[in-house]
Amino acid sequence: MRILVIGAGGVGRAVVAIAARRDFFEHMVVADYDPARVEHAMGQVAGDGRFTGAHVDASDVDAIGALIREHRITHVLNSVDPRFVMPIFDASLAAGVDYMDMAMSLSRPHPERPYELPGVKLGDEQFAKAGAWESAGRLAFVGMGVEPGLADVFARYAQDHLFSEIDEVGVRDGANLTVDGYDFAPSFSIWTTIEECLNPPAIWERDRGWYTTPPFSGAETFEFPEGIGPVECVNVEHEEVLLVPRWIKARRVTFKYGLGDEFIEVLSVLHKLGLDRTDPVKVKGGEVSPRDVVAACLPDPAGLGDRMHGKTCAGTWVTGRGKDGAPRAVYLYHVVDNEWCMREYGSQAVVLQTAVNPVVAFELLARGTWSGKGVLGPEAFDAVPFLELLNEYGMPWGMREEPVPVGAG
């Protein structure tokens, strides 16, 4: 297996650090438009001949294809923000190699009823090309980060091993992370955070299909494990809601994220001022994207690890009837502590938790444990080998029995 990682930001660097401890691949090329990022990533693996740095523009299909051919790449990992999904996705198909990402092609709200009806949904552009991938005999493995990714693996595990009927698959994400010295410092890409938090969140129901609601709707308090405690979560646009119903038989699928009042207020102000826009505006004779300006003004999340404290939790809350037919509710989860992440890998918790999952998935593909053709999400594969290997990587998952919701069953 010869892997091209496009994007040497926080997640890309963490992928390198994690993969360096494994022996399932022959070579890994780490490419970015910023040479300093590549140099930083390569510094983690100095002396390891399996790694090579390279330059690439993630929006340039031809340049990506040339890099794939130059290094005889067999698998591409997209580790940049989702505006570059389609160029990398298309370049991989054209080059005849397998592809993996951690975030899917962007959505576009319904032009007339954005808070009721979906427009172009997350991943629609990719699934529209599923036939071409299948005909080519290649795999486009989409949404294989932590959320989406591990959360979807949990949904498949719940269907296969815990439930006979599923009422709701509800992804719930929360943390108690703090960052010293900053009033506002997102722990993940602000570009991506703005995209998913300010777009209309999607919900799926068996009798209704996909529909949308206003941003930050559906507030609820969820009790997170391992000392994180209660966090208010709200509806956020996320790929799980678009992926899970394709393979998991559930009556309802939701995604709620613990943002906090201050974070919601900041995002709301950015939206009111138009600073969430991605289309360029003219400034003193030049053109610049307002969202890119916001991202440039905030600290790089990858560099915040030594100032961060606390834990982050990604997980999937599932309700329905257990294998014995009795009402049941569980929360399958993955918690990582920032102090451990920094000590063990030199990466902060959120990026490390994201990065470990594509590496685990690549190892399963290299072993032949997982295989497939077409455009497939994590739910399409047996969950058990993944969860077992995640434990082997030293990042164990957990499960907690939950109170059965009133009226369930």
Image (cartoon, rainbow, N blue to C red):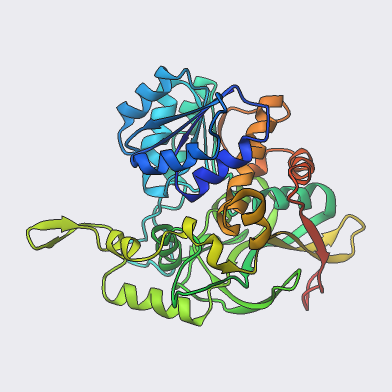
Say which quarter of the image contains residue 290: bottom left
Q: Is residue 376 above or below residue 313?
A: above
- Residue in view at x 59 percent, y 54 percent: 147
- Residue in view at x 67 percent, y 39 percent: 360
| Quadrant that contains the C terminus | bottom right
Please state if 1 lies on the left or on the right of 129 as rendered.
right
Q: Is residue 351 above or below residue 54?
A: below
Q: Which x, y percent locates residue 336?
A: 68, 59
| Quadrant that contains the N terminus | top right
Q: Is residue 65 above or below residue 263?
A: above
Nearer the observer, 86 or 33: 33
Please state if 30 lies on the left or on the right of 225 as rendered.
left
- Residue in view at x 57 percent, y 53 percent: 347
Say which quarter of the image contains residue 223: bottom right
Res. 388 visible in picture = yes
Please state if 126 lies on the left or on the right of 234 as rendered.
left
Q: Which x, y percent locates residue 327?
A: 85, 67
Say which quarter of the image contains residue 407: bottom right
- Residue in view at x 50 percent, y 22 percent: 135
Count of numbered circles on the image = 0
Residue placed farthest to the front in the image?
Answer: 47
Nearer the observer, 322 or 389: 389
